[in-house]
């Protein structure tokens, strides 16, 4: 059971995300818990899942919200699933402060 969707790694952070493609509007809905009690960041994009369009839209949205360049983000697990693991390259201490804006369940982007 994990209460935060973020895990510190040697080269940055790993973030658990649940993506909803083809949403009526794009945004970050904050942290949610699955049935097992594991936390994830709920994100919506308007792009369809075909051809990796939703994944590209996800990374673009997160890069903008977190104030990092797109090249610092990568999907390392779940590229063809709604549940994904995203890595953010950089100093974990600095990144933790940048990313906290999106972990408030009341935050909307």
Image (spheres, rainbow, N blue to C red):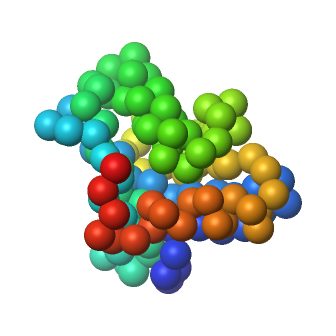
Residue lying furthest left: 24
* Residue 98 appears anywhere in the view: yes
Q: Quadrant of residue 24?
A: top left
The residue drawn where x is 49% and y is 81% is 3
**Residue 79, can we see it?**
no
Residue drawn at x 55%, y 40% is 63
Residue 53 position within the rendered picture, expressed as x and y whole percent measured from the top left? 39, 22
Q: Nearer the viewer, residue 69 or 7?
A: 69
Whether residue 54 sits left or right of residue 78 in the image: it is: left
Count numbered badges in the picture. 0
Instruction: Residue 87 in the image: state x and y as whole percent.
Output: 65, 49
Residue 23 in the image: state x and y as whole percent. 19, 38
Residue situated in front as seen by the camera: 98 or 16: 98
Compared across the picture, whether 107 is left or right of 90 comes to left
Q: Is residue 61 above or below residue 57?
A: below
In the rendered image, residue 13, in percent from the top left (x then y), is placed at 69, 58
83 with respect to 86 (left or right): left
């Amino acid at each position: 059971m994990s209460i935060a969707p973020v895990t510190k790694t040697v080269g940055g952070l790993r973030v658990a995300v649940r993506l909803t493609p083809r949403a009526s509007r794009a945004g970050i809905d904050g942290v949610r818990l699955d049935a097992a009690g594991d936390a994830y960041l709920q994100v919506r994009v308007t792009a369809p899942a075909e051809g990796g369009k939703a994944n590209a839209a996800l990374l673009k949205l997160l890069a903008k919200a977190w104030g990092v360049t797109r090249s610092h983000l990568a999907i390392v697990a779940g590229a063809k699933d709604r549940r994904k693991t995203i890595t953010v390259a950089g100093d974990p201490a600095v990144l933790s402060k940048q990313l906290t804006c999106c972990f408030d369940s009341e935050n909307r982007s």
